[in-house]
Image: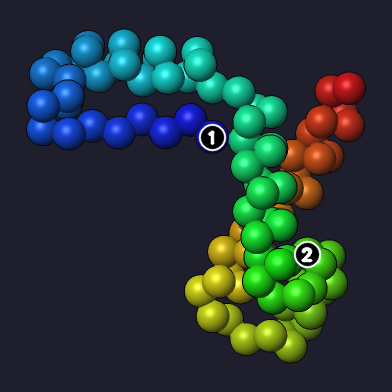
Amino acid sequence: MSITTFTAQTLPQSPQALRETLQQALEKHSPLEDFIQLVRDLTRFEMQYQMNSTEFFHRFQQGELGDQMDYLRWANEYEMYQEAKANSVRFA
């Protein structure tokens, strides 16, 4: 996942410079890298909570697990993963 960060020294000095910087970042963007990062994030949650993401999401939706921040993040990541998988099948 491509991340563009700025510091006081690297902050673009004009709107045009900001647009150019963001355009360059978009050109470098790789959907495959985003997908790989989603898989890594899901794997980390699965290892931490000793549960696969499909089971987690089902239990989370049933209200069995509560709403702690990690679960909200995991559910969000899982939904993005499912959407990315659906989109990759559609374009394959």
* Tag 2 secondary structure: helix
Across and down, in percent, residue 31 comes to: 65, 27
Count of marks overlaid on the render: 2
Residue type marked 1: Met
Q: Which residue is mark 2?
A: 53
**Of callouts 1 and 2, the N-terminal one:** 1
Q: Position of residue 54 (x, y in %)?
A: 83, 65
Q: Nearer the viewer, residue 79 or 43?
A: 43
Is residue 31 left or right of 19 when viewed as pictured? right
Quadrant showing the C terminus:
top right
Q: Residue at x 48, y 30 (%)?
A: 2
Which of 63 and 10 lies nearest the eye of the viewer? 10
Measuring from the top left, give residue 42's x and y in whole percent: 69, 57
Q: Give the residue at mark 1.
A: 1
Marks 2 and 1: in contact by CB < 8 Å? no
Placement of the N terminus among the 4 image quadrants: top right
Q: CA distance from mark 1 to mark 2?
A: 21 Å
Colour scheme used in the picture?
Answer: rainbow
Q: Residue at x 73, y 66 (%)?
A: 46
Q: Is residue 91 left or right of residue 6?
A: right
Disc 1 crowd, CA 10 A, few/some/many (<14, 14-19, 20+): some
Q: What's the amino acid at mark 2?
A: Ser
Horizontal side of residue 22 vs 38, given as left or right: left
For the point 54% across and 22% down, which residue is it? 29
Q: Find residue 61 and report its horizontal and vertical position in percent.
A: 75, 76
For the residue labelled by badge 1, is the local secondary structure a helix, a strand or a loop? loop
Quick check: 8 above or below 72? Answer: above
10 Å neighbourhood of mark 2: few (<14), some, or many (≥20)?
A: some
